[in-house]
Amino acid sequence: MTKEQILWEISKKLVSYPLALSRMEQIAKAIRAGESAERVWLLEHPPLYTSGTSARAEDLFNPAGYPTYHAGRGGQWTYHGPGQRTAYVMLDLQRAHGNTPARDLRAYVLALETWIITALASFGLKGEVREGRVGVWITNPHTGQEEKIAAIGVRVSRWVSWHGVAINLAPALPDFDGIVPCGIREYGVTSFEKLGVKATMQDLDQALMAAWHTVFSSTPAPVNTVDVTQGPVEFA
């Protein structure tokens, strides 16, 4: 694999959050040491809530009693569950990626937003960003209300990124009622399914791969299936 490519991974079974955290952290350290390739890891989690560094205890209700985890990323409370595509992005931010300059965290978050918006456009969805509201938003054509379709939460350790984005394809939207998503009470959440857009997870993955090159310039390598277990992480 050349520097013009990026490793693209997928886990086809639900991945527990502690295992995902452990794997991301090990890979981030290996990227920093020059022992591992940069990558995007696509997966789904079982239903759970994660807290970012700004999360408030009063914003968690959790009537279903789902597991909760401290994520160590920026942001507040986030829900993860089946039907939501989580993409963990592990890059060496000490170098530029497309139009995203090196060592510029604000530009990196903007690039993630642009990546999602570009992918959504291929389904006829108009994603937008809003000042003071991290993530990607869509105006519901039936109600005129702005609703979040994708969340973004990143962590950068010595200029290597981990964590990433979560896009709502067809998750159980009532599960979002167990938190104040990202600390924002005034707006709801939406999904492809709620908006009446018929798409599979594979369709969304293909759109994300196509949009990646547009935004970050590198080309996704052939998808590598990753079965995450308790075993040691293998680096590529």
Image (cartoon, rainbow, N blue to C red):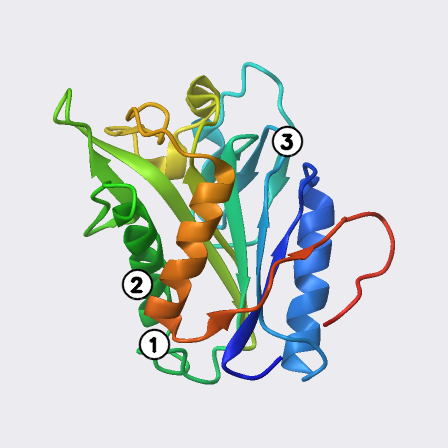
Give how far across and how far down residue 199 sits, in percent: 40, 34
Residue carrying label 1: 100
Q: Quadrant of residue 66?
A: top right
Q: Is residue 227 above or below residue 140?
A: below
Residue 162, can we see it? no
Give the structural element (helix, strand or loop) at label 2.
helix
Give the structural element (helix, strand or loop) at label 3.
loop
The mark nearer the N terminus, 2 or 1, is 1
Residue carrying label 3: 46
Q: Is residue 142 left or right of residue 137?
A: left
What amino acid does circle 3 point to? Pro
The mark nearer the N terminus, 3 or 2, is 3
Q: Is residue 124 above or below residue 162?
A: above
- Residue at 29 percent of width and 59 percent of height: 114
Q: Residues within 10 Å of mark 2 (few under 14, many from 20)?
A: some
Disc 2 from disc 1: Cα separation: 9 Å
- Residue at 64 percent of width and 69 percent of height: 28
Q: Residues within 10 Å of mark 3 (few under 14, many from 20)?
A: some
What amino acid does circle 1 point to? Thr
- Residue at 58 percent of width and 83 percent of height: 2
